[in-house]
Image: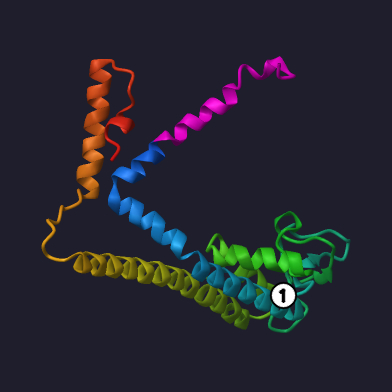
Amino acid sequence: MVPGGAIGGFSGLRSLRALRPLRTLNSVPSIKNLVATIFNSGKLLGDVCLLIFFLIFLFSIVALQFFAGKLRYRCFSPLGGVTEVHRLCGSTPDAKQCPSGFTCQETNINPNYGYTNFDNALGSFLVIFTVMTNDGWSSQMYMIMDVTSPAAFSYFVFIVLLLSVFALNLTAAILASRFSLARMEKAAKLEEEGPGEEEIEAPSCYESTLECVLGCVQWCDSGEEESCFTLNMR
């Protein structure tokens, strides 16, 4: 007896049946080769991830040196009130200045509920990772430009070029090279087998998928208990 009879006969394990369509990878050679190529590129992709981590760490150190505490400045009135909660300002001449009659003072408030900051290594790492994903990176760039200088845009441009564009293209180049190498190895293996053997052309991805779908339709019409994926497995 299994303690806790309320589990309903392992009903949660039945959700694993959703993984059954993965067995069709064996019947679609092109998808099978693509998945195998991704796994074979694991070592090179690991090196790319290490390079990305190093670049994020490097940009984090630079941000800590130049932008630490800069996003906590707000405009205050002589009576002690803040003009706007998100009204940023800077103490440098090139930064965004407060309206007439207000002064720029440091607070303990950072934008986006405190998540956008360069006050520590973790916050700086998180902001740079967000910029790398191109998710709202321009708003963070404008905030830094408001509290420091318009020249701060070059920092974010380098992040986008090195971490977003360069790293993405490097990953795609690794996968493409491994896929080409796998095709060359397969062609060389076929040449070694000799021209005497009859070469059987493997079905394309479209033909194999169409055959599997037709098998599912026939199974539903016949009412048999066998799975269409088993009928079409090769």
* Quarter where residue 34 is shown: bottom left
Q: What segment is highlighted magenta in the picture?
A: 1-20
Asked if residue 10 lies in the magenta stretch, the reply is: yes
* Quarter where residue 222 is shown: top left
Asked if residue 182 lies in the magenta stretch, the reply is: no
The residue shown at (70%, 76%) is 63
Residue 43 in the image, given as x and y percentages of width and height: 52, 68
Q: Amino acid at mark 1?
A: Gln
The residue shown at (39%, 61%) is 37
**Furthest residue in direction right, as rendered:** 79
Horizontal placement of 207 versus 113: left or right? left
Split into 4 quadrants, where in the image is the C terminus? top left
Split into 4 quadrants, where in the image is the N terminus? top right
> Would you place residue 38 above or below residue 173 in this image?
above
Q: Which residue is mark 1?
A: 97
Residue 107 in the image, given as x and y percentages of width and height: 84, 65
Horizontal placement of 9 versus 67: left or right? left
Q: How is the image coloured?
A: rainbow
Between residue 184 and residue 175, name the one nearer to us.
184
Residue 66 in the image, given as x and y percentages of width and height: 73, 80
The residue shown at (20%, 48%) is 203
